[in-house]
Each structure stands twice: as C-alpha cells, then as structure tokens.
C-alpha cells in the first residue's frame, strides 16, 4: 500500500534562478553556510529567496554534539579573507540584514569571539 504524506511535510526541491545564484555565489566566494554545513532542510526555501545564514571560522566544529550535522574534528586555520568575502556576498545578494554565526572553535583562546568583529566591520 502506498504511503501518503501531508502536504506540509513535503519540501520542494531547490530550483529557480535565485537558488542557483545564491549557490553559485557561496561557491565563488568559498563561504560556508549553516544551510549547507548543517544539512538544513530549509536550504531550498532560503536560497530561493536569496538569503543564507553565513557561518564563519570554517565548517568544522571542535565539539561533537550528537544533534548537529556540522562536521566535527580539527578545524582549518583561520581564513583572514573570509570577513571580506562575506561582505561581498551580502552586497551581491542585496541583503539589508545578514545572519552570521560560527562553528565552535575550542582550539582558539577566546573561542573565536574576537573574529566576529571582522565581518561586522566589513559589512
């Protein structure tokens, strides 16, 4: 017997020009987003609206939380150009607001807190 799911449970596959633009921009500027790194089921909806949640300090978390889909392990060194690229992407997308978050970086003395100032200043 076939299984039927309610319409509110079904997610449309990501398509459309805006989705492709956001996806291409993220790749072009070598940025990370929660949408991609955390395997967010709303990625298609957000990218199709021309928005994304930017994730700084890389895409590898130093913690091993079971509920999270972000990669765990030893992170890469800090990318000094990341803040500028986030600002470029926000500008290209024409966003009035940007959400910037990060992975947990227990390997850094302040957990990376001081590095949040750079994308804010660049924006």
Image: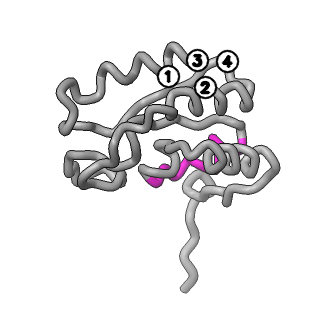
Q: Which class describes the residues within 10 Å of circle 4: few (<14), some (14-19), or many (20+)?
A: few
**Residue 14 image position (x, y, % from top left):** 68, 56
Q: Which residues are magenta?
A: 39-48
For the residues labelled 4 and 1, the Cα–Cα distance comes to 15 Å
Q: Which residue lies most toward the bottom here?
A: 1
Asked if disc 1 and disc 3 are in contact, CB closer than 8 Å, the reply is yes
- Counting residues from the start of the chain, the first of labels 2 and 1 encountered is 2
Q: CA distance from mark 1 to mark 3?
A: 6 Å
At x 44% / y 51%, what residue is drawn? 37
- Answer left or right for 103 relative to 26: left
Q: Which residue corresponds to mark 3?
A: 123
Residue on which disc 1 sits:
119
The label nearer to you, 3 versus 4, is 3
In front: mark 2 or mark 4? 2
For the C terminus, the quadrant is top right
- Helix, strand or loop at mark 1: helix
Q: Quadrant of residue 94?
A: top right
Instruction: Verify CB contact (< 8 Å) between mark 2 and mark 1.
Output: yes
Q: Give the alpha-carbon distance from disc 2 to disc 1, as whole Å.
A: 7 Å
Give the residue pinned by disc 2.
87
Q: Which residue is mark 4?
A: 96
Q: Which of the two marks, 4 or 1, is nearer to us in this view? A: 1
Task: Rate crowding at label 1 as few (under 14), some (14 to 19) or many (20 or more) other CA atoms within 10 Å.
Answer: some
Tell me the crowding category of disc 2: few under 14, some 14 to 19, or many 20 or more residues within 10 angstroms, Cα based.
some
Q: Is residue 47 magenta?
A: yes
User: Distance from label 3 to label 4 (Cα)?
Assistant: 10 Å
Q: Position of residue 72 (x, y in %)?
A: 27, 54
What residue is rendered at 77% in x and 44% in y?
18
């Amino acid at each position: 017997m076939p299984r039927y799911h309610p319409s509110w449970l079904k997610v449309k596959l990501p398509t459309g020009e805006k989705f492709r633009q956001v996806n291409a921009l993220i790749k072009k500027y070598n940025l990370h987003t929660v949408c991609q790194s955390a395997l967010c089921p709303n990625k298609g909806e957000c990218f199709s609206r021309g928005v994304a949640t930017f994730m700084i300090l890389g895409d590898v978390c130093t913690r091993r939380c079971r509920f999270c889909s972000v990669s765990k392990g030893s992170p890469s060194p800090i990318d000094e150009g990341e803040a500028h690229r986030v600002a470029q992407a926000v500008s290209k997308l024409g966003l009035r607001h940007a959400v910037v978050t990060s992975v947990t970086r227990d390997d850094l003395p302040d957990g990376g807190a001081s590095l949040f100032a750079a994308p804010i200043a660049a924006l």
